[in-house]
Amino acid sequence: MKRTFLVLLLIVLSAASAVSARAGDAPPGTGEAARPFGVGPQYDTSHVYVAPADLERFVASFVATFGGKATAQSTTTVTPTPSTTLLQAALAPVGLVSAFGFTSPVPYPFGSERTGYLVTDLDAAVRAARDDGASIVVAPFDDPIGRDAVVEWPGGVRMQFYRHTVQTQSPALETVPENRVYVPSDAADAFVSDFSRFAAATLVSDDAHAPGIEVGDPAGTYRRIRLESLFGKLTVLATDGHLAYPYGRETTGYEVADLSGTLAKARAAGAAVLVPPYTSEGREAAFVAFPGGYVAEIHSRVK
């Protein structure tokens, strides 16, 4: 079974190229030799937790909506303490998802991490994250094909770092998804400062009065910060927490060329449109819920 799991994840979360593998051999620490820790957004994966009975339906719906392919299901342990989960992944040209259907109770704190980021050196990345303001929620542990850790940034943002024993290459995505991070307004500066230092991120924009329609408040405004790094795109949505469902439940925004066509595919594949398309600052966007409950933002650029 571990061999099946190995084949599965090597296909889904293919780790670094030879260049990035050599970077992972750099001396540990937070100095210039250890940075940057990112490899590329094609190695980022959104973590999706669903009931085991919904796993296959979710993955099939995701692939039918965005294209790409699904892996076969595998049964394995992905936590440092005993547990069992069904694992299936979707490899779409707009981003990757790793879907977990736990058949045992889910050990704490798994399920609270939103994203898996490939890093060039796990131990150095964990040390750097701590030095840059993160808390280590789950210390590095071995899995069947590598090592992982979970960290938490100011504002309660949790993400998983991973590194595989065997490294292969993964092709670039057609469009880069955005990691959508909701934080309290008073934690936004700390999160942006700490994560940007760790990720060597570039500030793309910081709008203190972004249109509130983006967070379900057409009459109001909120603060929106966009960052880019080797980990890909990250959008910080700093709010007062007065959010109607489903805002704040989505962890990833997927860019497509044709929003209406994509929504039609999503509906046909069993997904529900929770927020119909709206236009804001050069983007047409909508929110959908896939079978199993995974909420995603989908957007296209307004031509």
Image (cartoon, rainbow, N blue to C red):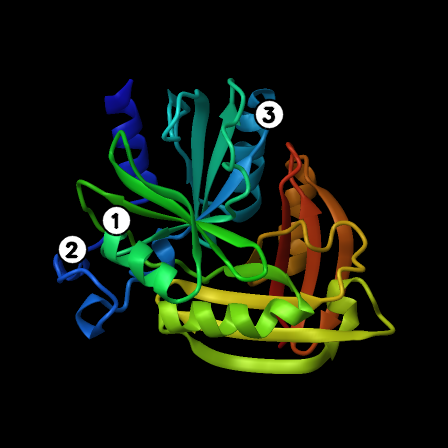
- Left or right relative to 266: residue 209: right
| N-terminal-most mark, 3 or 1 | 1
Location of residue 93 with respect to 90 vertically, above or below? below
Residue underneath mark 1: 15
Q: Position of residue 49 (x, y in %)?
A: 55, 34
Residue at 23% from the left image edge and 55% from the top image edge: 121
Q: CA distance from mark 2 to mark 1?
A: 8 Å
Split into 4 quadrants, where in the image is the C terminus? bottom right
Mark 3 — residue?
51
- Above or below for 69 versus 209: above
Residue 120, picture quadrant: bottom left
Vertical placement of residue 6 versus 262, above or below? above
- Looking at the image, which residue is at 17% across and 57% down? 24
* Among the two numbered marks 2 and 1 on one chain, the one whose residue lies closer to the N terminus: 1
Instruction: Classify the position of the N terminus by image quarter.
Output: top left
Type of residue at label 1?
Answer: Ala
Instruction: Give the mark nearer the N terminus: 2 vs 3.
Output: 2
Q: Which residue is mark 2?
A: 21
Q: Secondary structure at mark 3?
A: loop
Task: Tell me the SS state at disc 1.
Answer: loop
